[in-house]
Image: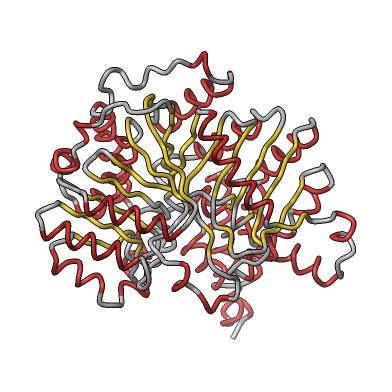
Amino acid sequence: MSFFTHPSTLVLFLHVLIVVVIAVRVIMRRPQPGVAFAWLFLVAIFPFGGPLIYFLIGERRIGHRRKQGIGAVRTDYHKLSEASTWEDLTEVDWSRHPPPAHGMDRLGRKSAGAATVRGSSFELFSDTQEILQAMALDVDGAKASVLMEFYIWNEGGTADDVLAALMRAAKRGVACRLLVDAIGAVSWWKGSQPQQLRDAGVEVRPALPVGVLRTFVGRTDLRLHRKIVVIDGKVAWTGSMNLVDPGFFKQEAGVGEWVDAMVRLQGAVVAPLAATMIGDWTLESKEPIRNLIESSGLHLVKPKGPADIQVIPSGPGETSDCLLQMLLSLINAAENELVLTTPYLAPDESMIYALRGAAGRGVNVKLIVPEKVDSFLTRYASRSYYDELLEMGVDIFLYRSGLLHTKSITVDGTMSMFGTVNLDMRSLWINYEVALFVYEPEFAVELRALQQTYLDDADRLDPAIWRTRWFHERFLENTLRLASPLL
């Protein structure tokens, strides 16, 4: 047997060919250099296994049908937006806001087709029991429709009160639609509650279901991470909290109870939030969007309250880098103070540069993260970013009373971001998220007060002590950081 026909030679040749093909594909897709080199290294060093992993999660593949569906939804989104233009709700008085706000509005319009709407009221909630109870009351008051989507739904505690309210609403003739992520709530889908809801008349669907065949047409780890509730087209909820009672959720993880916040909204902002959920439902159900518009009561949305709010939905096939650009614009707008909370920190390099730049130019930057998180990889990868932030004067606070899950940013007490997006690569590039950019000082002040309660229950990381940690800890952190672009 010659060298060229030996099985090992053929295997080597096939591996080299696969590496070359994937290298060409990676180069032509133009990811960030760090991401590109991470994938090329993985593909080259792990024959066949590396290419398989790349095939599964290396690209933001969504499949041809879903791509077409998102395109159709984007077209219909403009129809939905028309339902929210009662009394020209997109005509905002930008003279009452800091100059960067108007630029962010233009950025959101151009990148995501999402305009700021004027005339919304808000009520910020930070007690999870109050959130679940208030949400159940809203559902009990529904007369026409209830739209809900969540990443996780978990059985037990006060979460079951919301489930019971939803079933009562369906039984009295309210059109109830519930969309829950197939993987985020995998345990819930295996239980009895989905069928209980269906038996009561609630339309229940899994979002982004997985399967062998779906692996060949798109990534199976794309997840619906949004949390949206819309009732009668008049009231909406969004924020960081999944439909769970913290006392009954992940108690075995050893991180304490999850700490979240939600905002209850009325007025113009209800329409774009409803449009986001309706788009997601349409993709999974193929139900005509006109039916959803009529049953959700979008045509009834009217201005109520002082707040000007921009709703930015994001995800593969919907927007490219709009959410990242909006976050960078908000960070760069800070002149005096910038406060951020996130449970998971594995950001895009540009965000690290923006945070370092803000601290370097004299902005008081405070980053609040949980002391303990439920992901081993994220826990150590996140710590690898602390050094470069600390050296520029960013104050890092470790929240010690549970897993701080609130995702928020406040800038100078005038502008803020509040929603479902973590400051990590998964939220920025892979998950389907929704974020509120709120151009209203009153909301920023309330949110900043909530952030202060987190600061009061957190320990400031001492840079001098942090630098003395053991070499093996730093090595583990920096090693796992290499995987952060692949999350």
Task: Say whether residue 208 is left or right of residue 44.
Answer: left
Q: Position of residue 281 (x, y in %)?
A: 25, 51
Q: In which quarter of the view is residue 199 placed?
A: bottom left
Q: Quadrant of the C terminus?
A: bottom right
Question: Quick check: 331 above or below 86?
Answer: below
- Asked which colour scheme the image uses, the reply is secondary structure
Q: Quadrant of the N terminus?
A: bottom right
Residue at x 54% of width, y 52% of height = 406
Question: Quick check: 1 above or below 295?
Answer: below
Q: Position of residue 114 (x, y in %)?
A: 39, 31
In this figure, what is the number of numbered marks? 0
Task: Say whether residue 241 is left or right of residue 331.
Answer: left
Task: Say whether residue 313 is left or right of residue 162.
Answer: right
Pick out the residue farthest to the bottom. 1
Q: Nearer the viewer, residue 454 or 109?
A: 454
Q: Position of residue 64 (x, y in %)?
A: 31, 50
Residue at x 24% of width, y 70% of height = 194
Q: Position of residue 124 (x, y in %)?
A: 46, 44
Residue at x 71% of width, y 40% of height = 355
Q: Nearer the viewer, residue 103 or 283?
A: 103
Task: Say whether residue 315 is left or right of residue 326.
Answer: left
Residue at x 59% of width, y 33% of height = 330
Q: Nearer the viewer, residue 358 or 142?
A: 142
Question: Quick check: 305 above or below 487?
Answer: above
Q: In which quarter of the view is residue 47 placed?
A: bottom right
